[in-house]
Image (cartoon, grey):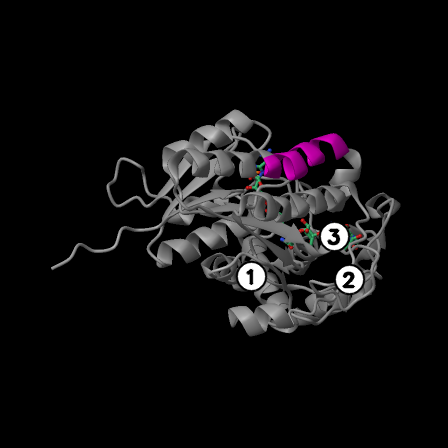
Amino acid sequence: MGEAPKAKKALITGITGQDGSYLTEFLLKKNYEVHGIIRRSSNFNTQRLDHIYIDPHNTQARMKLHYGDLTDASSLRKWVDAICPDEVYNLAAQSHVGVSFENPDYTADVVAKGALSLLEAVRIHIENTGRQVKYYQAGSSEMYGATPPPQNENTPFHPRSPYAVSKLAAHWYSVNYREAYGMFACNGILFNHESPRRGENFVTRKITRAVGRIKIGLQKKLYLGNLKASRDWGFAGDYVEAMWLMVQQDKPDDYVVATDDSHTVEEFLKEAFGYVGLDWKDHVLIDPRYFRPAEVDNLRGDSSKARKLLGWAPKVGFKQLVAMMVDSDLELAKREKVLVDAGYIDSQQQP
Ligand code: NDP
Ligand code: GDR
């Protein structure tokens, strides 16, 4: 009898984020050993991983967390060498487009230079050990910015924010490392993907969180910016599978991942409020501070390449996604209400 094949090792940056948590679940199900880089914070930042966390002293633990930072190249070098991963998924980012106008240097440090530092860490590791390591870069539809839809792998990029410009740099670093060093570096160009774990200051979650709170009586108004922008919104759980599929190919390449369907923010509002029998117009107010200095008006993917070559397709459509998020946020609001009624928290503490 031969020995069972050794479990593959994945290293994920951004493991504490929305996609990091779904990708970890996905890889653990595929029997990977998953290592994640987390940054030090004065508060715990591992809430999205709590349900899969097993104390490292337990020999059953297959997810391991290590302190590091995309802006600290030495930590990246150290962990790549210590872990010897088979696959590296670079998901870490200052990922908020609006915030990138306020923190442009930091956004570039993490998103652009951080990706370069990680690629260098992987390249040097490969050079020193002769091992094969595959690299995935979390690219974004924001890179298309002002170029009209549908957007696919041949569409010219026209980024409209410091975030998008930095993502484009990271995209080209991957292409360059592929061409210059023959590295397996692939770029996923992912359109917006959401879930009940989406950060609360992205528009979909901000809306579904408010719907839950308004329905339960914890909040009355919701302040938003531009309602006319259109996005191609999919479900994060579906999109992490596409990341993995890209990495399993024989040759590295770049792929658009999208539902190929788009809706305006206003349509999202109508669907989310309508789902619980409310009219969004009774609750939404416009606050100019949520408008961006340069907006991306219209994103709609053409993911035919990923569908054909990876055999990937999204399972969750727009209405299902909205329903999933509103259902989850209604439950959250109910739990919050218990704490408010017991006097433990103030209902004015809006997320
Ligand atoms: P999140 O904002 O939910 O997660 C970002 C992750 O990056 C968090 O784990 C965060 O840690 C970590 N991070 C931030 N700064 C640093 C740093 N300096 N060093 C190390 N880690 C850091 O993003 P998503 O999960 O939604 O997205 C994952 C990736 O995909 C990002 O790169 C994003 O830009 C990109 N993307 C996302 C899309 C989407 O629609 N969700 C679409 C296209 C691309 P902490 O928890 O401590 O903040
Ligand atoms: P986006 O997502 O910028 O597409 O980036 P976001 O949800 O922040 O904005 C989508 C659209 O909604 C408009 N909008 C508002 N946005 C926010 N955040 N808050 C508001 O109050 C509000 N009102 C209107 C925005 O102007 C925009 O047009 C996301 C991120 O996950 C990126 O990391 C990722 O790369 C892209 O998706 C693809």
Residue 291 in sight from this viewpoint: yes
Of 125 and 198, the residue lying toward us:
125
Mark 2 and mark 3 in contact (Cβ < 8 Å)? no
Label 1 beta carbon within 8 A of ligand 1: yes
Amino acid beneath label 1: Tyr
Query: From the viewer's perspective, is the residue at label 1 or at label 2 nearer?
Result: 1
State yes or no: residue 153 in magenta.
Answer: no
Task: Specify few, some or many for label 2: CA neighbours under 10 Å numbering under 14, 14-19, or 20 or more.
Answer: many
| Residue ID for mark 2 | 265
Image: magenta residue range: 104-116
Amino acid beneath label 3: Met
Image location (x, y in percent) of residue 333: 59, 54
Image location (x, y in percent) of residue 124: 48, 33
State yes or no: residue 112 in magenta.
Answer: yes
Give the secondary structure at mark 1. helix
Real-space Cα distance between discs 1 and 3? 18 Å
Task: Specify few, some or many for label 3: CA neighbours under 10 Å numbering under 14, 14-19, or 20 or more.
Answer: many
Q: Quadrant of residue 79?
A: top left
| Residue ID for mark 3 | 143
Real-space Cα distance between discs 1 and 2? 21 Å
Please tell me whether the stretch drawn in magenta is mainly helix, strand or loop. helix
Task: Specify few, some or many for label 1: CA neighbours under 10 Å numbering under 14, 14-19, or 20 or more.
Answer: many
Give the secondary structure at mark 2. helix
| Residue ID for mark 1 | 239
